[in-house]
């Protein structure tokens, strides 16, 4: 018997959406207020979905404490209260939440206790993005 589990984590971070090789007016047209020179913050919510067989012993797909520990060390520590534009993961790239999804998905690929299915990130109450590995 296989099941999916999803767990949510929260972190604040800032970013600025800006293409270095585009003009101010082009950047404004593409990104609007998100191109503000001083950047802006979001309270991001990560929802990671994993799957696997339900253990006959524990009745669980995976140990949530192990997932929390991994997330703290491998995912949140590098993102929490950061300016995403300054992270090496986004060097030369605009740190949109689409790209943040891909980055977080790649970080979770090192988690070996269950199969990684999806990373979904809520940026605002209106916007969410997800990535499933392709
Ligand atoms: Ni933004």
Image (spheres, helix red, strand yellow):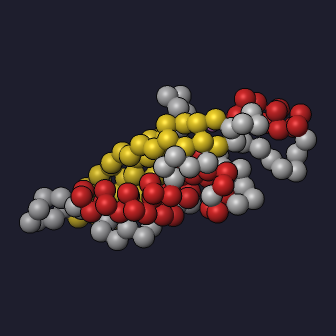
Q: Give x and y (percent) for residue 64.
A: 24, 56
Quarter of the picture holding the N terminus: bottom left
Residue drawn at (53%, 28%) of the image: 126
Against 110, residue 13 (above or below) is above
Foreground residue, 41 or 129? 41
Q: Is residue 110 above or below residue 50?
A: below
**From this viewpoint, is residue 25 visible?**
yes
x 80%, y 47%: residue:
19
Quadrant where the C terminus is found in the figure: bottom right
Asked whether residue 51 appears in the rendered view, the answer is no
User: Could you tell me which residue is drawn at 62 percent across and 61 percent down?
Assistant: 89
Number of numbered labels in the structure image: 0
List x then y, in percent, for residue 43: 49, 37
Specify whether 82 is left or right of 69. Answer: right
Is residue 38 toward the left or the right of residue 117 in the image? right
Q: Name the side, left or right, on which 6 lies relative to 99.
A: left
């Amino acid at each position: 018997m296989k099941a999916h589990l999803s767990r949510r984590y929260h972190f604040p971070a800032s970013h600025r959406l800006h293409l270095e090789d585009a003009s101010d007016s082009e950047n404004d047209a593409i990104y609007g207020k998100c191109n503000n020179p001083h950047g802006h913050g979001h309270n991001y919510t990560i929802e990671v979905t994993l799957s696997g067989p339900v253990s006959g012993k524990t009745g669980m797909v995976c140990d949530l404490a192990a997932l929390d520990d991994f997330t703290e060390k491998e995912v949140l520590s590098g993102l929490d209260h950061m300016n995403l534009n300054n992270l090496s993961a986004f060097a030369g790239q605009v740190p949109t939440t689409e790209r943040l999804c891909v980055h977080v998905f790649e970080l979770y690929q090192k988690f070996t206790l269950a199969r990684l299915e999806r990373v979904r990130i809520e940026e605002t109450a209106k916007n969410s993005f997800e990535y499933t590995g392709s």
